[in-house]
Image (tube, rainbow, N blue to C red):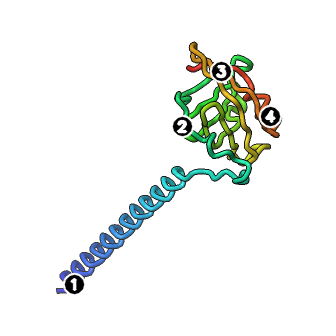
């Protein structure tokens, strides 16, 4: 009889271990799902431009006739400008530090407004407005209209070809 009690206690400890292990697995899966949903929600959020409403001409923010989505390479220094929807990144072709700037973009009929959102930027949330022209050879020319950020304006004011 002593043996039976021993086996019964052993079975009970195995059952409690299985229950404990199952609870830990369920909690881990729940935390993963919650984290995924929070990160996915953050990546879909938009950056709000802090320009005063009186200074923005609402008639200029019109859907452009052409799509600028894709990767553009500067003839000046080989920098790559990637535009995807309302986001952009600028990368340099070097090994040390590739991403120079990233942020939000608003494209109008003939104007583009860049707002850097990366923390390391010297031009944090100051917008830069550029006139653009897309020619038949799919070359994009950006000319500064107003941009107080010297680093961005030196890099952006150029002619770009699409990759």
- Tell me: residue 114, above or below residue 91: below
- Tell me: residue 98, above or below residue 43: above
Of residue 80 and residue 55, the one placed in the foreground of this image is 55
Quarter of the figure that contains the C terminus: top right
Residue name at image x 48 percent, y 53 percent? 40
Name the residue beneath numbered marker 2.
63
Residues under numbered marks 3 and 1 in contact, where contact means CB atoms less than 8 Å apart: no
Q: Which mark, residue 151?
A: 4
Please give left or right for residue 149 compared with residue 60 in the image.
Answer: right
Name the residue beneath numbered marker 1.
5
Could you tell me which secondary element the residue under label 2 belongs to? loop
Q: From this viewpoint, which residue is outermost toward the top?
A: 137
Please give left or right for residue 3 compared with residue 16 in the image.
Answer: left
Q: Which mark, residue 20?
A: none
Residue name at image x 64 percent, y 26 percent? 80
Q: Position of residue 31 (x, y in %)?
A: 44, 63
Q: Please tell me how many numbered marks the rendered image carries.
A: 4
Name the residue beneath numbered marker 3.
160
Q: Position of residue 38 (x, y in %)?
A: 50, 59
């Amino acid at each position: 009889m002593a043996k039976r009690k021993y086996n019964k206690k052993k079975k009970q400890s195995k059952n409690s271990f299985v229950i404990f292990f199952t609870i830990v697995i369920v909690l881990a899966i729940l935390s993963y799902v919650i984290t995924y949903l929070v990160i996915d929600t953050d990546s879909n959020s938009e950056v709000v431009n802090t320009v005063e409403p009186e200074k923005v001409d609402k008639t200029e923010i019109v859907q452009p006739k052409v799509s600028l989505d894709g990767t553009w390479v500067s003839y000046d220094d080989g920098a790559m400008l990637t535009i995807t929807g309302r986001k952009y990144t600028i990368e340099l072709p070097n090994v040390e530090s590739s991403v120079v700037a990233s942020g939000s973009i608003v494209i109008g009929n003939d104007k583009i407004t860049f707002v850097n959102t990366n923390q390391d930027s010297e031009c944090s949330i100051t917008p830069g407005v550029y006139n653009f022209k897309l020619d038949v050879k799919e070359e994009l020319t950006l000319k500064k209209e107003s941009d107080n950020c010297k680093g961005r304006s030196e890099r952006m004011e150029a002619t770009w070809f699409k990759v």
